[in-house]
Amino acid sequence: MKPLTKVTALAALSASLLATGASAQLAGHNVVLVHGFQQEDLSSPPADLQAVKDAGEDYWRTFWLSRSEARIDWPSNGRVEGSIAQQAYSQIRSISQSGLCSNYCILVSHSTGDLVTRYILENQARWLRNEGLQPLKILTALDFSGAGGGTELADLAVSVAYNDSWYLAPVKAAVKAFTGIDPKPGKLGVVNDLQTNAARNLAVSPNGIPRIRLVAGGSSYGGITKPFIAGTDDGVVPTHSACGATTAEGVDSCVSYLSLKGKYTSQNGPDDLYYNHYPVLMNEGVSHSGVLGSETGNTSVPVVNNTTLNGFQVDFASRTYNKRAWWQWWGAGDRYIEVPGSAQTDMSSLVYSTLNN
């Protein structure tokens, strides 16, 4: 396909900024989306920026597309510090020139978009000032199933790419479910950056922008990936990453006193969280992709709540109750907390309706 000219590319970017309508805001601020890993980019690399943009639009169509003003789309066959940064910056430049974030924007990321967002937040001001442009004003970021701490599936993918032994068949099946391909050296793109050690050494300088963590614990790919991920997980991203833990050790929950399903009980929680990372909701049942609006029937649990982060109000409703198991004939039972009614809606709708005040 013929490469885009600079004029055509700028026109495509400008159109994407306006494509979702002029009233798509969250709490009075424009929303910018940063999507996650796209398997198809590894098997069929995007031909140009427009192909990347088209895939980015499809990624968010279930819920967030109509509630956003812009996107930062990127190619999963690239590396964060390479073509991903280059294509992201071309879009960041257009957002700056449009003035879209003059009253502060809210970033919404999913999965690997968490890592890309972190890299953007560390570098965008310097990039833009070097061209005499105004840095984007970012109020906060909502990170659904954030993979900023990497995933053990990426570690396995890189390992399997260099080892074709027959006895690795179960590992290969899990890796293929995750990547969509039979891994080969030089063909894994951003999966290289998702290795736990690599991810945790990329753009880790503290900054003043709160990262609101929305954590899932359901199953993906029929459950075949779960045995290979440390601690609890959503079938793709381990809880240690989604919570924002400072180490890649497997954990059961974002906190030591509350399970993913809301039961007050001792848990193997993180020793510490990255600066300005706040696990706000946990949901034991929702899957990695289901957090974006496709799944109901899963109860969300408030963790960091009734607080204000950088002027952004977090105030989910909560209900604490006691529940006895069927075999318990005495005592008050176990204590739980939940967001009432959360099982009747999807996680993205819950987050949007609650924070849009």
Image: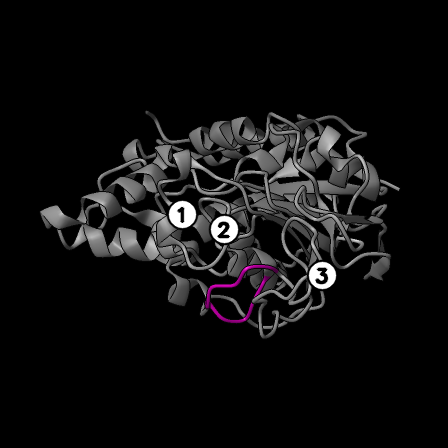
Residue shown at 86%/57% (left/top)?
306
Q: How is the image coloured?
A: one colour
User: For mark 1, what is the residue?
Assistant: 226
Q: Amino acid at mark 3?
A: Pro
Q: Quadrant of the N terminus?
A: top left
| Nearer the camera: disc 3 or disc 2 | 2
Q: Find residue 233 and name its label.
A: 2
Bin the neighbour count of mark 2 within 10 Å (Cα to Cα): few under 14, some 14-19, many 20 and up: many
The boundaries of the magenta stretch are: 244-253
| First in residue order: circle 3 vs circle 1 | 3
| Quarter occupied by residue 4 | top left
Helix or strand or loop: what does disc 3 sit on? Answer: loop
User: Left or right: where does residue 335 sit relative to residue 315?
Assistant: left
User: For mark 3, what is the residue?
Assistant: 210
| First in residue order: circle 1 vs circle 2 | 1
Residue 272: in magenta span = no
